[in-house]
Image (spheres, rainbow, N blue to C red):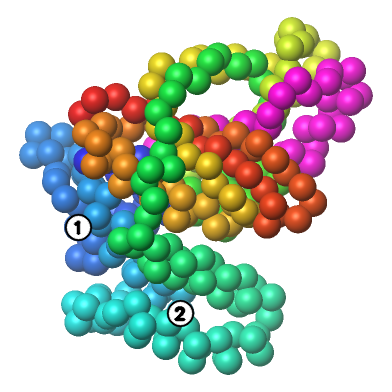
Amino acid sequence: MFSIGDFAQLGRVSVRMLRHYDALGLLRPAHVDPASGYRFYQAAQLSRLNRVIALKDLGFTLQQVRSILDEKVTVAELQGMVRLRRAELEERIAADTARLLRVEARLRTIEREGHMAIEEVVVKRISPVRLAELSAVAASYDSQDITPVIRPLYDELFPRLERAGVAPAGYGIAHYEPVEDGSVVVHAGVEVTAEASRSHDFQIVDLSAIETAATIVHRGAMDGVESTYQVLAHWVEEHGYRSLGLAREVTLECPADPGGWITELQLAITAA
């Protein structure tokens, strides 16, 4: 099982949202520790989470979402709802169009349920790495909160490195830290060999090795990374592991077209 923070990252939602869904009876934790009150979730619950978010973004109230889910809405019915809603969304402003794209991303994840290639997951050791990085806070793990934060960080990082005479020496690596209020600290970094200096207007940090990491390659824009994270979640649980903290995202290829991006997700794991 996964802690509420780990489950929030794997499902690409906020911890606050999961707590709200619990309070409404939409998505109860699989287990609540009677002593600490900590919530724990199973990978199988990602299926219900996908449907909750898709239906909510289609404009249903949470009370309506609960009623629909209690009737066990099918993927075909969800697709029908999307087609009906599409005609309305196309007449709205750009913000509504972005919402539709998020719905479609969740639907692609739902369609892959039961057809996920968990053999794509590779377990390996991740060596220590030195990064030059910039950091900022995003409201949650949701892609709509992460993307507007991380892209400007990278846009600013590389000019700063050039001004400092520091050359990238490897891949771009994003890593994350949860905050108690449900937000997340986003670290946008790139591998370097330089030493830290007070003159730098960026940070030099050393990420420790990950002795045992479950890794998987995501192909395409990071706005659609949810399904890849969920493949990873199912693999971790099915193979008797538990996650340790939040995954690193290593950009292996980053062409101008986001559809050609290749990113490796690296999740530290240990035996459950």
User: Is 186 placed left or right of 196 in the picture?
Assistant: left
Q: Residue at x 47, y 40 (%)?
A: 216
* Residue 197 visible in image: yes
Q: Which residue is mark 1?
A: 28
* Residue 135 visible in image: no
* Residue neighbourhood size for the residue with mark 2, other residues' Cα within 10 Å, grouped as few (<14), some (14–19), many (≥20): some
Give the quarter of the image for residue 93.
bottom right
Q: Which residue is mark 2?
A: 58
Q: CA distance from mark 1 to mark 2?
A: 22 Å
Q: Residue at x 49, y 15 (%)?
A: 209
User: Is 58 covered by the magenta stretch?
Assistant: no
Q: Position of residue 58 (x, y in %)?
A: 45, 79
Between residue 256 and residue 175, name the one nearer to us: 256
Q: Position of residue 211 (x, y in %)?
A: 41, 16
What range of the chain is rendered magenta? 153-182
Q: Position of residue 206 (x, y in %)?
A: 59, 14
